[in-house]
Image (cartoon, rainbow, N blue to C red):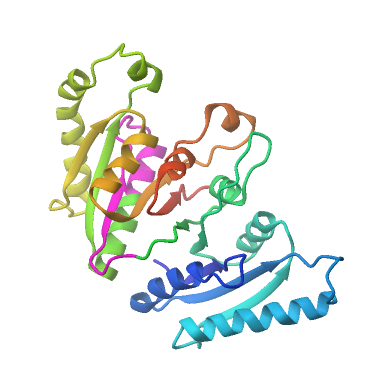
Amino acid sequence: MVKNVLVIADIKDDETFALEKAYDLSLPIGTRLEIIKFIHCGDDSQFTVAQQMDQARELLANNIQKIFQDVSEITSKVVNSDNIADWVLEHCRQKNVDLVVKTRHRTESLFHTPTDWQLLRQLSCPILIASHIKWKPEANILLSLDLSTDESQHQQLNKSVLGWGNFWSLAYDHQLHAAYSIPIAKPLLELELVDRHEIEQKKSPKAKEKMAALLAEFEMDTVPGHIGSGPPEKTIPHLAGELHCDLVIMGCMGHHGISSYFHGNTTEKVLHNLRADCLVVKLEQD
């Protein structure tokens, strides 16, 4: 499933979180890694652009050598650009990239779309947004499913999430958990206009039935299922914390444009509150 991985090295030279995550990924599955280091050569520097590029290449090579024992399947490059998202998107359009790995960058405002958000909305391949927390030897992985509709696109995303979860579990021997949050509008909960317990009693049986059927289709009957209720941006991070999950896998419809600023994107909202790593999968036709 994963052959070619594009790794976006950390901006700071003394940070190697993205490389360390890529190293963990590459051990059991023999992936080919392409590591890109972005720098922005300033005119006010005492060094020329060529000197700054050479320094960055040397630092990157040293970090790669320090972390990876076998560098035969690794290529690396230093890029002088302050527009990471545009470069990555164009690069992925031109090359066959199965997965992008980068560490989380959180500087969001109303009229500025951070790199993470641009990649989430526009990348066609999955992206692993990595935290600065190391995985446990026996990690738990949470599969976030959407059982609210039978629409084909949502079903396709659910199957992609389960497919990636199955692949990850077999490759790393990690424990899987499946989760679904019965949607309840946040204002209704805050104003106490609905009874969460009553909604769960009413809708949980059907949700459990749908989850069981979906898991059975992937021969994942032994995977524990968890049904909650409320806004996913609250319930999914909370459950991931309770289960001590190192990774959450979820689908993203890739909404973008002005509507995403005002209506938001569920994946982005979950990421905002999540401490664990997050693998975001997209629709194939995207």
Q: Which residue is located at x 62 percent, y 47 percent? A: 114
In which quadrant is the N terminus drawn?
Answer: bottom left
Q: Is residue 95 above or below residue 27?
A: above
Residue 160 visible (yes or no): no
Q: Residue at x 60, y 61 (%)?
A: 92
Front residue of 13 and 224: 13
Left or right: 47, with 56 as reference point = right
Q: Is residue 284 above or below residue 155?
A: below
Q: Which residues are magenta?
A: 135-160
Q: Nearer the viewer, residue 95 or 128?
A: 128
Q: Nearer the viewer, residue 220 or 79?
A: 79
* Residue 273 coordinates in the image, percent (x, y): 42, 42
Task: Give residue 243's position: percent from left, percent from top.
Answer: 23, 50
**Residue 158 colored magenta?**
yes
Residue 137 on image: x %, y %: 26, 69
Left or right of 110? Residue 203 is: left
